[in-house]
Amino acid sequence: MRTHTPRPDLAATVAALALALTACGGGDDTADAKSTAPAGEKVRETPPPSPASGGDMDPGQSAMGKVDEDPGTVTYEILPVKVDVGTEAEAAKAVSEPDRAKGNVLATARVTYTHKGGPALTGGSDVHDAATVFADGQRGTVLIGATEDAPGCEDPYDVDAWREGESHTFCETYVVPANAKSIQVHWTEDEVDGEPYIWEFPNKSA
């Protein structure tokens, strides 16, 4: 079980940077199957199943993962829906050392989590702790306290009475190179030894 970190002060106007560089990768195996439907009957198309333990994901494809929350283990469906990429000027205003923002931009990943099984939550969630943002395969620099007030972003520690079947969208903001060709959103069930699920988004601002 992870321990909650103190919630950043919403009144703070300057965010602190915490840098962690890692390399990662993932794979995805697929296979074609013949239809067994009777002749003339329309076959219903379904999205490809989620890999069992990480790998590259298709756009719109969700993953399933378990998190040890305060009341007990909860199963979640994880789906990054969008990545917003800002400008160098916005990055310079957001970080505590503007010189370090030169050549970099802010990438905010919006991830929707759906409670699929387990106890209801009554005091926040840790599911967002496993989400990270990479650019061209390199992990970005997390910008702490950057998205609590962003439109469409919820504070995971303000979510009360989260029951099975309900969804919430949490956001993660990272500093990444402005010229990165693509942004990848990672979510890892086992943050120590697990292989991440990886969703790739083009950087349209590059």
Image (tube, grey):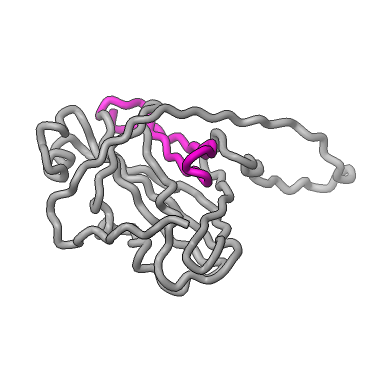
Q: Nearer the viewer, residue 160 or 69?
A: 69
Magenta residues (range):
178-206
Name the residue rendered at 43%, 62% in the picture.
125
Regarding residue 58, the answer to whether it shows in the image is no
Q: Position of residue 143 (x, y in %)?
A: 25, 45
Residue at image coords 23%, 35%:
105
List x then y, in percent, for residue 117. Answer: 60, 63
The image position of residue 18, as x and y in percent, is: 25, 41
Looking at the image, how many numbered discs can be counted on the residues? Answer: 0
Residue at point 59% right, 66% down? 118
Q: Is residue 147 left or right of residue 80?
A: left
Q: Nearer the viewer, residue 59 or 197?
A: 197
Does residue 176 appear left or right of residue 24 in this picture? left
Whether residue 112 is situated above or below residue 92 in the rendered picture: below
Membership of 161 in magenta stretch: no
Task: Report whether residue 37 is seen.
Answer: yes
Quadrant where the C terminus is found in the figure: top left
Q: For the point 28% across and 37% down, which residue is it?
A: 141
Which residue is the extreme one toward the right? 38
Q: Is residue 109 above or below residue 206?
A: below
